[in-house]
Image (spheres, grey):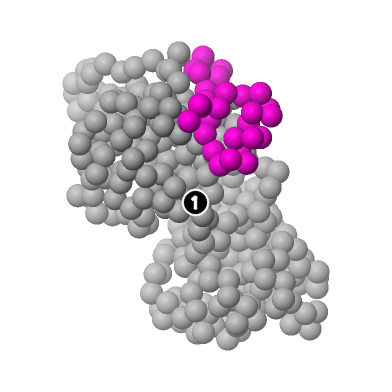
Amino acid sequence: MKVHILDDWFDTLRGLPCFEKLTGYDVTVWTDHEPDPARLAARVQDAECLVLFRERTKITQDLLGRLPKLKLLSQRSVYPHVDVPACTDHKVLLCSNMHSDTPSYAAAELTLALILSSYRQIPEQVASVRSGNWQAGVGRTLRGRTLGLYGYGRIGRAVAGYAEALGMNVQWWSSEEGRARAIGDGVKVAESREAFFGSSDIVSLHVRLKPETRGIITDGDLSQMSPRSLLVNTSRSGLITPGALEQEIAKGRIFAAVDVFDNEPLLEKSNILLSHRNVLPTPHIGYVTEDEFDLQFSDIFDQINAYTRGAPIHMINPEVWSPTA
């Protein structure tokens, strides 16, 4: 099988233990990003399997129509970037392990790192001392602050454990079902959505992006946040109503630490989320660690091996599969 791996920007996978699972395949690794469907299709014209790095490349009807040899898309986690009906139309099987029992500890750790970096002004202090100056300002302590976690899921619970170890107070908000689970687990749930945003020193988002969660954080929610409070988003930018965070940041009232953006890669230096002094931006690195890659791509390569053995796993559109496909 001819396997093409897209968007391995730092050529990381070939150096990881999981890569041995592709022994025997004809593997091509692309270390840059090609957004144009026509040019991308020309690159991967002979591909029978495409391996995706999360949402870095969109799989569209246009692209699929240009790849007649493609049989399998193998990836991990959610797939808002994949046109599943188009995959089905073109008889391309999508396999994606939803890892229902495993949180991304890398994303949880980055969330904590962003909180610490913002509160202790670490980027500013480093820039100051490197420029020949000394202290650049006065930071804030986390102990005793209230961390509001939106979304009662695996990553949020990992972040809660880190926060409690630092002596922070943790409270939750989520869907009705999520709040019920949280209450059942005996953790603190805010009295109301307004109270959650209004009483949290830090609000961190940990919700999967789905049609029903798109734009779930509104300008009204952000306006409820107290002055100098911090919004952290290591999940997906689409959770926030378009433009709402930018408008609130422009007021200079709250702070933000964001790892995700509406358009990625975001290279416009003038964008307020990159340029405003109240924002700490990182370039979608929540899951970008060697350890996380080895975990994720081990699953992805297992899916390829299962397919070639004639017993696919984690099928999203199983209706296209037949043993003779």
Q: Which residue is mark 1?
A: 213
In the rendered image, residue 183 lying in the magenta stretch gets the answer yes
x then y, percent, for residue 108: 53, 35
Category of crowding for the residue at label 1, using alpha-carbon neighbours closer than 10 angstroms: few (below 14), some (14–19), many (at least 20): some
Where does the image place residue 247, in percent across and percent down from the top left?
24, 44
Q: The N terminus lies in which quarter of the figure? A: bottom right
Total number of numbered discs in the rendering: 1
Q: Residue at x 47, y 65 (%)?
A: 57
Along the line of sight, the residue nearer the viewer: 241 or 10: 241
Based on the displayed image, in which of its 4 quarters is residue 28 positioned? bottom right
Q: Is residue 7 left or right of residue 279?
A: right
Which element carries disc 1, helix, strand or loop?
loop
Residue placed at 45% from the left, 57% from the top?
A: 9
**Quarter-of-image position of residue 259:** top left
The magenta-colored residue range is: 164-192
Q: Quadrant of residue 14?
A: bottom right
